[in-house]
């Protein structure tokens, strides 16, 4: 028994050390360099700033390109809210249909979901498709892209939870005269609250932190998202690393805070369907 406890302590300490090395050390490096002058930050040293100017760097980040970061935060929040709302609702309904109804159609849909998880998104064909529809570079097209690229993952986490909901609830509601929409929104959807919170938080982080998709699918002035603002301080010949690191801090801290607050709910939602899923 004692040897087992010692082994657990050793492995726990090892896991904690690895976590600190992988997550805390890089974050501390960014924070330290964000408070330095441009000359100090270009040295990329893990040291305390000789000239502490975190506030000046923060002001410079917000004032860059006529307060672009404020517009970018507005765009990112709007993109996240619209995309995640539609995505979660659509994925929940699709997961319920796939899980409850068998047959060839459900198997085909499940196969498409698995393909969507295994095959990376095709950027160029998607751009051609959006151009053919006449919506390329618009905010609604960016919402559709985020929904399409995250649907497979969201359906998978919903399905594992829906499989634990007894089918007798569906049958009882149908006997009482409930239609399909009433059955889903009045009976099934309220039961999805644990996994719903998880899906909302995870997808919000994915969409808010997305860099590649807005870069390719949402070009133009005034449509920037927070991740794209990193280009304000990086160019081919000159990079203000102190401002770049400060920008990274500004756009990272909100998601870190959200994860810290909802960490238990995320874990509970991800493991809720593990017994039967």
Image: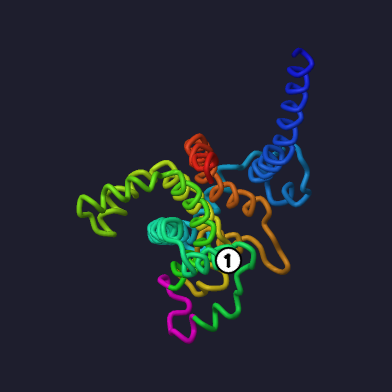
Q: Judge whether residue 84 can be spotted in this image.
A: no
- Colouring mode (rainbow / by chain / secondary structure / one colour): rainbow
Q: Is residue 13 magenta?
A: no
Residue bearing mark 1: 116
**What secondary structure is marked by label 1?**
helix
The foreground one among 40 and 68 is 68
Residue 134, given in percent of the width and then of the height, sits at 43, 84
Outermost residue toward the bottom in this view: 132
What's the residue at 77%, 48% (across, down)? 44
Residue 82, given in percent of the width and then of the height, sits at 38, 61
Q: Is residue 68 left or right of residue 50?
A: left
The foreground one among 218 and 183 is 183
Q: Is residue 34 left or right of residue 203?
A: right
Label 1: how many residues lie within 10 Å, few (<14), some (14-19) or many (20+)? some
The foreground one among 158 and 16 is 158
- Quadrant of res 111: bottom right
Q: Judge whether residue 230 can be spotted in this image.
A: yes
Residue 268, given in percent of the width and then of the height, sits at 50, 37
What's the residue at 20%, 50% (across, down)? 176
Q: Is residue 10 left or right of residue 24?
A: right
Against 107, residue 7 (above or below) is above
Q: Is residue 133 magenta?
A: yes
How many numbered circles are shown?
A: 1
What's the residue at 78%, 43% (across, down)? 45
Residue 159, given in percent of the width and then of the height, sits at 48, 52
What's the residue at 60%, 51% (across, down)? 248
User: What segment is highlighted magenta in the picture?
Assistant: 130-140
Outermost residue toward the top in this view: 2
């Amino acid at each position: 028994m004692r040897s087992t406890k010692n082994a657990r302590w050793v492995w726990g300490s090892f896991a904690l050390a690895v976590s600190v090395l992988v997550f805390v050390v890089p974050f501390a490096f960014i924070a330290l360099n964000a408070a330095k002058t441009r000359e100090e930050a270009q040295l990329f040293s893990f040291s305390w700033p000789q000239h502490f100017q975190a506030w000046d760097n923060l002001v410079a980040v917000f004032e860059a390109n006529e307060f672009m970061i404020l517009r970018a935060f507005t765009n990112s929040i709007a993109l996240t809210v619209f995309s995640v709302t539609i995505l979660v609702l659509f994925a929940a309904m699709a997961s319920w249909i796939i899980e409850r109804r068998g047959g060839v159609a459900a198997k085909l849909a499940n196969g498409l979901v698995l393909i969507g998880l295994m095959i990376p998104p095709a950027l160029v064909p998607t751009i051609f498709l959006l151009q053919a529809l006449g919506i390329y570079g618009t905010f609604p097209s960016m919402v559709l892209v985020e929904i399409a690229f995250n649907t497979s993952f969201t359906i998978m986490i919903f399905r594992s939870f829906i499989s634990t909901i007894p089918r007798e609830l569906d049958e009882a509601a149908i006997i009482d005269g409930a239609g399909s929409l009433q059955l889903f929104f009045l009976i099934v959807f309220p039961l999805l609250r644990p996994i719903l919170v998880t899906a909302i938080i995870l997808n919000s982080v994915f969409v808010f932190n997305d860099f590649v998709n807005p870069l390719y699918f949402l070009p133009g002035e005034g449509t920037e998202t927070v991740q794209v603002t990193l280009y304000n301080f990086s160019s081919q010949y000159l990079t203000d690393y102190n401002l770049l690191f400060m920008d990274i801090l500004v756009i990272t801290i909100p998601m870190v805070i959200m994860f810290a607050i909802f960490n238990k709910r995320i874990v509970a939602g991800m493991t809720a369907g593990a017994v039967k899923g």
